[in-house]
Amino acid sequence: MPNVEFKVGHKDYTLSCQDGEEKLLRRAAGMLDAEARQILDQAGRMPEPRLLLLAGLMLADRTSALEDRAAAAERELARLKSNPPRIEVPVIPAEIGEVMAELAARAEALAEKAEEMLGDEEDRSA
């Protein structure tokens, strides 16, 4: 079993942990140390049991707030999954396609007529 050394507040600690859990233990100890240092910065030196208690309570309070936010997010996600927002995509009626095809045919006929007229004018001027 590996031993992990860390500091919380003003005291050094060594704990054993399972193989592969060293990183997790260091991270948790770092969080506890950050809270302890914040307390020491505000209140000054204090007995170790009180410091650990206050730091643990601060972390528990933060964890509780995060759990509340996670639960609210899970409820909102469940609500959205059970009643997804309706998204409507406009559908072009078939009649519009027919009208567009007729307009395109008319435009082509007008273009041909215009080309013929231009061709006739060019022949006259030559």
Image (cartoon, rainbow, N blue to C red):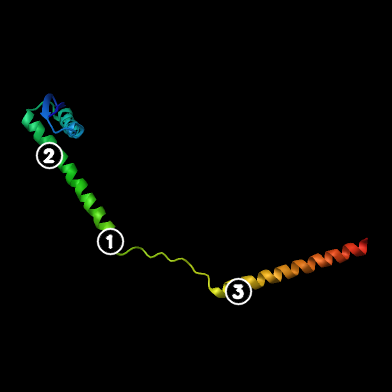
Could you tell which of marks 3 and 1 lies nearer the N-terminus?
1
Q: Quadrant of residue 104?
A: bottom right
For this rendering, which residue is in front, 64 or 24?
24
Q: Is residue 7 above or below residue 104?
A: above
Question: Closer to the observer: label 3 or label 2?
Answer: 3
Q: Is residue 124 left or right of residue 95?
A: right
Label 2 element class: helix
* Amino acid type for the residue under numbered disc 2: Leu
Whole-percent x, y for residue 7 in the image: 15, 26
Which residue does the numbered mark 3 point to in the structure image? 98
Kind of residue indicated by mark 1: Arg
Rendered residue at 62%/73% (across/down)? 99
Relative to 16, does residue 115 appear above or below in the rendering? below
As helix, strand or loop, the secondary structure at mark 1 comes to helix
Q: Which mark is residue 79?
A: 1
Residue farthest bottom in this picture: 95
What residue type is disc 3 on?
Glu
SS category of the residue bearing label 3:
helix
Q: Which residue is mark 2?
A: 57
Q: Where's the N terminus, which quadrant?
A: top left
Sequence-earlier tag: 1 or 2: 2
Q: Are marks 1 and 2 in contact (CB under 8 Å)?
A: no
Distance of mark 3 from mark 1, alpha carbons? 43 Å
